[in-house]
Image: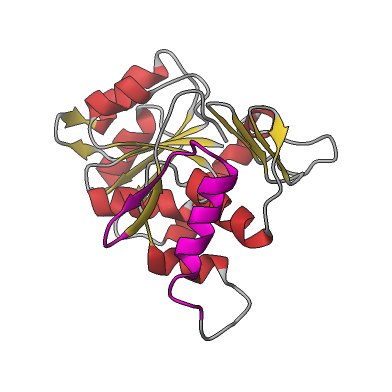
Amino acid sequence: MKILIVEDDHALNNGIALSFHGEDILQAFSIAEARSLFEESIDLIILDINLPDGSGLDYCREVRKKSKVAIIFLTANDMEVDIVAGLETGADDYITKPFSLMVLRARVNAILRRKPGQEEKSGMYQDGSRKELFEQNGFSFDFGEMVFLADGNPVELSKTEQRLLKLLVSHKGITLSREMLIDRIWTDGAEFVEENALSVAVNRLRSKLPGIPIKTVYGIGYVWENGKDCNM
């Protein structure tokens, strides 16, 4: 599933992006950025109304002239007249701040179930399971089938390396802290993880997959840098 988040609050934008881990996320902080990122393959737009360069209402009308993509307004404007105005512009739902990320995910899933053809767009295997394929610059990672290719050549990855790789590529462009990665990778309940275990896992990925765009953000963690021809 490809989601475009249009929200000028950087912390909130990043928080929403993290809550949809495993999806293909595009982040815009203004209408101008949203216009530059918009493409027909997008399944959903999460759209703030009060943006620094205009109104999300106007952008919604603009999108509706060319696309039936699902749109959810996310805004602090909670008056009944505001909600009606938002829905009348063509939005599928309207969520007021503050809100629960769990509720947001539930509303997103409900809307996409109602939209025809979304299952095919998000990618499914013939048995109905979700397709988890990532491709970028000669790399192909199929997390459903656990097949990892570099320039067409298979690469063997440990479970730890697979978990780390999936977290990074599914949050591409977003810096993930060392604490978050350790908490999500070592999920066996172990109380102690060696301090350098994450660094070792990153170095092994870089060794097995030369050229992967994993950047160290010193003092924070790691980020998979965005690139062309990438999808998941």
Q: Is residue 20 magenta?
A: no
Residue 205 image point, x, y percent:
55, 50
218 and 82: which is toward the camera: 218
Quadrant housing residue 213: top left
Any part of residue 76 in sight: no
Q: Is residue 90 left or right of residue 59?
A: right
The answer to whether residue 106 is above or below residue 123 is: below
Q: Is residue 9 left or right of residue 143?
A: left
Colouring scheme applied when the structure was drawn: secondary structure
Any part of residue 20 in sight: yes
Q: Please report the bounds of the magenta region as a residue range.
A: 193-220
| Residue closest to the far front | 207
Give me the residue at 57% from left, 37% from top.
1
Residue 198 image point, x, y percent:
48, 65
95 and 190: which is toward the camera: 190
Give me the residue at 60% from left, 45% from top.
208
Give me the residue at 53% from left, 23% from top.
41
The answer to whether residue 179 is above or below residue 19 is: below
| Residue closest to the far left | 52
209 and 220: which is toward the camera: 209
Q: Is residue 151 left or right of residue 86?
A: right
Quadrant housing residue 100: bottom left
User: Is the C terminus in the top left, top right, bottom left or bottom right quadrant?
Assistant: top right
| Residue closest to the far top | 66
204 and 32: which is toward the camera: 204
| Residue closest to the far right | 127
Q: Is residue 197 magenta?
A: yes
Give me the residue at 52% from left, 31% from top.
43
The answer to whether residue 131 is above or below residue 189 is: above
